[in-house]
Each structure stands twice: as C-alpha cells, then as structure tokens.
Image (cartoon, rainbow, N blue to C red):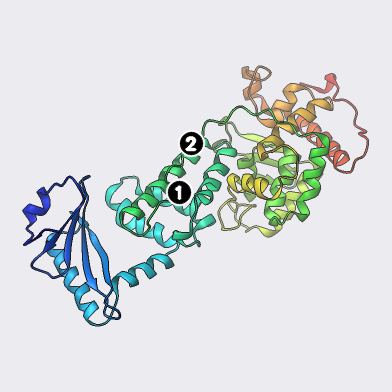
C-alpha cells in the first residue's frame, strides 16, 4: 500500500486500475481508497484499544470531504481511539439502529436538497407513500418484498405512473445509503418498474360478492377501510374518489355526494345520489370526521386514505376467493350486475361517470342534471339487489323500464 504526503492535486488526479489504498504520511492512519471507477473514499485504520484488532472506519468521500477536512476528522478519530473508543463499532451500532424514517431524513437533507431541484417531491413521496408503511422499520431490516408491496399496491390500484415514481425515489434513497455506507446492500437493487397491466375483465360472481362483503367485519380491517369497501360496492365509484370523500362534498338532506371535477378521472363534476344503505355508511363516517368542509371522511392521519391502502387491504386481508381480485374489480362488477337487473347502459355509465358511445354527445356531457332521477333510482335498485345477494334472497326487483330512461 503506497504511503505518501497526500496533496489536493494528487487526490484530484489519481487514477488506478485496481482498488488501491494510499496512506497519508502526515496523519497516522488516514487512508485514501481509490477504486477503478473513480470513487475516492477517506478511511481511518486503527487498532482497537480493547484487543488490538485492526479496524477501519469511513470518514467520507472526495470531493465532498476535502483533504484538509479528512485530516481533521482523522485526528478526531485517532484521539477517540486513544480514549478507548471504537469509531467503527460506534458507527455500525448507529447504522443498525437507524430507521427508514431516519434514513429518509438524512437522504433529503444531505442529498436531495443539495442535488435535486425536485427534492420536495422526493420528500413528499417518502412522507406519503413510504414512511407510513415502513418508516418505523430498521433500515438494515428492509427486504425487497417490503418495497415490492408498496409499488405493487399502487400498480394494482391503477396508479402505474405513481408506482414507477415511488420506485425511483426509494431506489435512489437506498442507493445513496449504500454509497454513504449506511447500508451494505440496497433492498431496491434489481427491482424493475411494474409492467403496464393487462386490461382486466374480472367480474365477481354473486357468490364472490357475498363472500367478500360477509368477510369485512372479521377481516381485521380498520372501520374506515370497511366503510370504503362498502361504498365501493354500493356506489360503483373509483376507490380514489371514495377514499378522498370530504365532508363538504356530501349533502345529507338531499342524499347527494358531489365529486368535484379536480377529483374525477374525466375532469367532470360528478353527482352521486346516495341510496339509504350508502347514506348510512356516510353518516357513520361523518360522525367521526372533523367539522370543517374539507375534512376527509376516511382518514387515519388527517389526510385522506390512499387508494393503494385499499388495494393492499384487499391483497393482504381479503384474498378469500379462488381467483385473485382487486378493488377496481368491484366497480366492473357493479356495472355488470346493474346491467343484469335491467338498468340501461347509458344510465349505468351516468352512475359510473363514464363517457363513451352512449353519452359522448353534447347532451350527454352538459345535461347531467337530467340523469339525476334515473341515477337515484338505479342506485336504489342496485343497493336493494346487493342486499338480496348478500343475504341470499331471491331478487324482487322489476326491470328498469325503457320508458323511465332518458
């Protein structure tokens, strides 16, 4: 191992074909480790006072840590060893105690803020999508499966772009942690973005609907999660729209839920009449929610429940059917079963806020109020049919007469 009086010029320009340690002859124990890829790390090599075992502790990397600063840190480390301390052991203990939340804070402060204009987005993704799930875990204990659960839940909820973005952030954070020697390996290494899902056509049978609904009370789910699943079945709306429901969107007197345009997939304000069964679920949630108009009805943290949490609940707590299913299959099931009980296609699409061949014209888009009575009747019929399915009772619903349709 070469020993020399290191200079800034030498540190800046040195290149090697194999990993090489250059020992400083100014500060005892200071070593510049240079790799063929150009990475240059400052380390201190010392013998532990307790047993004389040779130890190495990393101080930092060049150029973030200059030669002058590396020498000062090396002197501090040597002094600590003289006092009977073990810098490498202490660093390992701190690393093993670090939680994912601790690591995220370090990543944002020491890397993202210094190197990324979009650092606030990294911070948001970690705070909203990652830390609520694995924030309390020890960073060294995180497994590949823990990260796959997070990104798969988003992908299965139809949020493929968010899934890919979340993966990019966690991969960068854990990669940085390896570079900075907080971790030895990254649990995100090798994880690929989820492929664009094949268009699903899964429709639950009446028996499957019954089994899922009946399983809700005993599935170890939080009350807010159970309420969301019930409203998915009773209204046929998207999970993100149900999860994001706020107090000010609901008119209890008129039994109406108005989803603002900024929360709908097609950018159109959508009015959902609430059947008595759906209204009962909403009223229960409102008794628990804050009084402000913007207060979310379904929350655990003060923020609206994320739809990926519903997808994860279905995956972990409600996979009781022979074939895998997702929350979005509920919406498809509602649409299919509404058609089965005689509700006309353009009314089903009005209920679901779909725009297609049946409602693509100007009248279909701008004359939504015309459909409110039909939507109310359709959802009432559907709620009654759902109850008969759940309770295994024969249907007693008259077909949706063509003369009643707009």
The one of 310 and 92 positioned closer to us in this rendering:
92
Residue 279 position, x and y percent, is: 76, 46
Residue 382 position, x and y percent, is: 81, 35
Visible residue check, residue 245: no
Dividing the picture into quarters, in which one does residue 77 lie? Answer: bottom left
Check disc 2: other Cα within 10 Å, few if <14, some if 14-19, many if 20+. some
- The disc placed on residue 167 is none
Residue 188 higher or lower than 371, as above or below: below
Q: Farthest bottom residue?
A: 83
Dividing the picture into quarters, in which one does residue 366 lie? Answer: top right
- Disc with the residue nearer the chain's start (2 vs 1): 1
Mark 2 secondary-structure assignment: helix
- The disc placed on residue 161 is 2
Q: Is 106 placed left or right of 12 in the picture?
A: right
Q: Is 276 placed left or right of 34 in the picture?
A: right
Q: Is 386 placed left or right of 314 in the picture?
A: right
- Residue at 37 percent across and 56 percent down: it is 184
The one of 402 and 183 positioned closer to us in this rendering:
183
Q: Quadrant of the N terminus?
A: bottom left
Tag 2 near tag 1, CB within 8 Å:
no
Residue 364 higher or lower than 280, as above or below: above
Residue 307 position, x and y percent, is: 60, 44
Residue 76 position, x and y percent, is: 20, 74
Mark 1 secondary-structure assignment: helix
On the image, numbered disc 1 is attached to which residue? Answer: 125
Visible residue check, residue 270: yes
Real-space Cα distance between discs 2 and 1? 13 Å
- Residue at 53 percent across and 47 percent down: it is 150
The one of 228 and 257 positioned closer to us in this rendering:
228
The one of 340 and 49 positioned closer to us in this rendering:
49
């Amino acid at each position: 191992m070469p020993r020399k009086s290191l200079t800034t010029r030498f540190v800046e320009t040195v290149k090697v074909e194999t990993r090489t340690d250059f020992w400083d002859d100014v500060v005892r124990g200071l070593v510049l480790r240079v790799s063929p890829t150009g990475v240059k790390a400052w380390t201190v090599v010392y013998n532990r006072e307790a047993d004389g075992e040779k130890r190495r502790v990393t101080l930092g990397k060049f150029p973030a840590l200059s030669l002058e600063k590396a020498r000062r840190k090396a002197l501090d480390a040597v002094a600590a060893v003289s006092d009977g301390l073990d810098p490498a052991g202490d660093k390992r203990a701190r690393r093993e105690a670090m939680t994912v939340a601790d690591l995220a804070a370090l990543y944002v402060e020491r890397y993202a803020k210094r190197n990324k204009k979009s650092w606030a987005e990294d911070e948001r993704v970690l705070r909203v999508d990652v830390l609520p799930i694995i924030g309390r875990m020890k960073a060294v204990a995180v497994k590949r499966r823990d990260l796959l659960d997070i990104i798969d839940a988003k992908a299965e909820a139809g949020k493929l772009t968010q899934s890919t973005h979340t993966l990019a952030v966690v991969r960068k954070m854990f990669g940085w942690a390896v570079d900075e020697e907080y971790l030895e390996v990254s649990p995100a290494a090798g994880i690929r973005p989820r492929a664009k899902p094949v268009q699903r056509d899964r429709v639950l049978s009446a028996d499957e609907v019954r089994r899922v609904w009946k399983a809700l009370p005993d599935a170890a789910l939080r009350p807010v999660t159970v309420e969301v699943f019930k409203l998915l079945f009773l209204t046929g709306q998207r999970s993100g729209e149900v999860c994001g429901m706020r107090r000010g969107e609901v008119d209890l007197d008129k039994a109406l839920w108005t989803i603002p345009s900024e929360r709908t997939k097609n950018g159109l304000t959508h009015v959902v009449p609430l059947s008595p069964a759906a209204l009962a679920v909403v009223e229960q949630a409102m008794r628990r929610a804050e009084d402000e108009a913007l207060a979310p009805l379904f929350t655990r943290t003060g923020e609206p429940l994320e739809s990926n949490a519903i997808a994860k609940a279905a995956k972990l707590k409600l996979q009781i059917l022979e074939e895998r299913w997702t929350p979005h299959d509920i919406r498809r099931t509602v649409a299919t079963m509404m058609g089965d009980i005689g509700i006309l296609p353009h009314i089903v699409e009005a209920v679901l806020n779909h725009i297609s061949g049946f409602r693509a014209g100007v009248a279909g888009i701008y004359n939504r109020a015309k459909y409110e009575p039909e939507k109310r009747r359709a959802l009432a019929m559907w709620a009654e049919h759902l109850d008969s399915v759940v309770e295994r009772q024969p249907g007693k619903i008259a077909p949706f007469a063509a003369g009643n349709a707009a």
